Image (tube, rainbow, N blue to C red):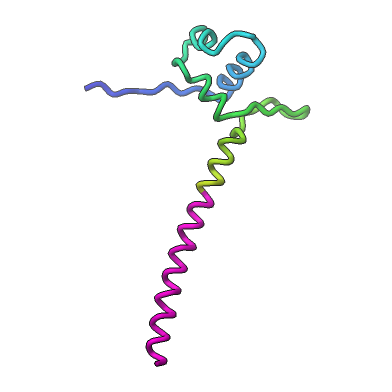
Amino acid sequence: MRDKRYRTYTEEFKREALELLKSSGKNSRQIERELGITQGMLLKWRDKYQVVTNEREAPRLEPSELEAAKKEIQRLERELREMAEEREILKKVVSIFSKKGA
């Protein structure tokens, strides 16, 4: 059986591809064919990243607002699970101490 090796792309390549999508007027499939990347990859990058430009720094990729929101939701869900576990522990402790005092 053959090992599947996925191609990895540099941040610079992704940034330039996204800038090309934004400025060229071509659709994503045309750009994907020209760049030799998998169909649908460019749209995934567009959803996942945003190109940030500053006057002082070179353009760079950052997580899109959607990706940042997803990470925040995951963090809040993890925190909610921890709080629920702590609440259950406290219920058991209160139950144990209330039985001893009776």
Return the x and y of residue 80 as percentages of the image width and height: 50, 57
- Quarter occupied by the C terminus: bottom left
Q: Quadrant of residue 19?
A: top right
Which span is picked out in magenta?
Answer: 75-102
Going 39% across and 23% down the picture, which residue do you hit?
6
Return the x and y of residue 70 as percentages of the image width and height: 54, 41
Q: Reply yes or no: does residue 86 show up in magenta.
A: yes
Q: Quadrant of residue 18?
A: top right
Q: Is 40 or 16 nearer to us in this picture?
A: 40
| Residue at the left extreme of this rendering | 1
| Residue at the right extreme of this rendering | 55
Return the x and y of residue 53 as percentages of the image width and height: 71, 27
Whether 12 is drawn above or below 88: the answer is: above
Whether 92 is drawn above or below 84: the answer is: below
Horizontally, residue 90 falls left or right of residue 45, namely left
Horizontally, residue 99 falls left or right of residue 55, namely left
Q: Is 89 or 32 nearer to us in this picture?
A: 89
Whether 42 is drawn above or below 61: the answer is: above
